Amino acid sequence: MKKFSSILFLSILLLLMNHSVKAQAKITHIAVYVSELNRSSEFYRDVLNFKEIEEPFKDGLHAWFDIGNQVQLHLIEAEWEPVTINKINHLCFSVPNMDDFITILRQHQVEFEDWPGEKNKITIRPDGIKQIYLRDPDGYWIEFNDEY
């Protein structure tokens, strides 16, 4: 009986400990405010090659994209109000081959630059990772690197 009580006590203690541990939050999506949904959707779908996915609103003001790692990008069109945009606040994506990606950008006539702002240049981090920066149709900064 004493052994059973000890096992029961330990089981209850473990159960309580598991319930007191909180789950770590995880990212599910990034929402981006855009001025023209169709223009931005074309950019993210056709230039950056993100897969457009079903969105529940069906109101012509939302577009959702699968951007990998079980994360979505939600574009939301609303009446445009000026926003402060600078390079420090940016989204970042990794590509398997920077040269191939730059070829796609050039085919779509999308300008890119290095961190200091020199056009058509690549930043190379101290660890050897290549980075470029570009703007989406509303001016938001996006970093692409080859840390794939």
Image: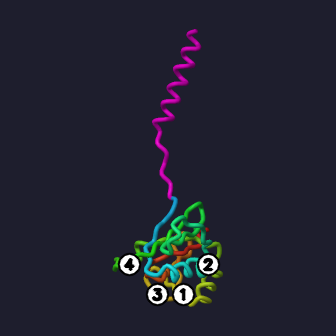
Q: Quadrant of the N terminus?
A: top right
Query: Closer to the N terminus: mark 2 or mark 3?
Result: 2
Which residue position holds label 4?
79
Range shown magenta = 1-27
Query: Closer to the N terminus: mark 4 or mark 2?
Result: 4
The amino acid at mark 4 is Glu
Task: Give the secondary structure at mark 4.
Answer: loop
Disc sitting over residue 98 in the figure: 2
Disc sitting over residue 118 in the figure: 3
Task: Please tell me in which quadrant of the rendered image residue 52 appears.
Answer: bottom right
Majority secondary structure of the magenta segment? helix
Task: Please tell me in which quadrant of the rendered image residue 93 appears.
Answer: bottom right
Which residue position holds label 1?
110
* Mark 4 vs mark 3: in front: 4
* Mark 4 vs mark 1: in front: 4
Residue at x-position 45% and y-position 79%? 115
Q: Is residue 113 above or below residue 143?
A: below
The amino acid at mark 2 is Met
* Mark 3 vs mark 1: in front: 1
Task: Give the secondary structure at mark 2.
Answer: helix
Q: CA distance from mark 4 to mark 3?
A: 32 Å
Residue at x-position 43% and y-position 80%? 35
Residue at x-position 58% and y-position 14%? 4
Q: How many C-alpha atoms fall within 10 Å of the one at disc 4: few (<14), some, or many (≥20)? A: few
* Mark 1 vs mark 2: in front: 1
Query: Closer to the N terminus: mark 4 or mark 3?
Result: 4
Query: Closer to the N terminus: mark 1 or mark 2?
Result: 2
Relative placement, left or right, of 90 versus 83 is right
Q: As rendered, which of 47 and 55 lies closer to the eye?
A: 55
Q: Position of residue 80 (x, y in %)?
A: 38, 79
Q: CA distance from mark 2 to mark 3?
A: 17 Å
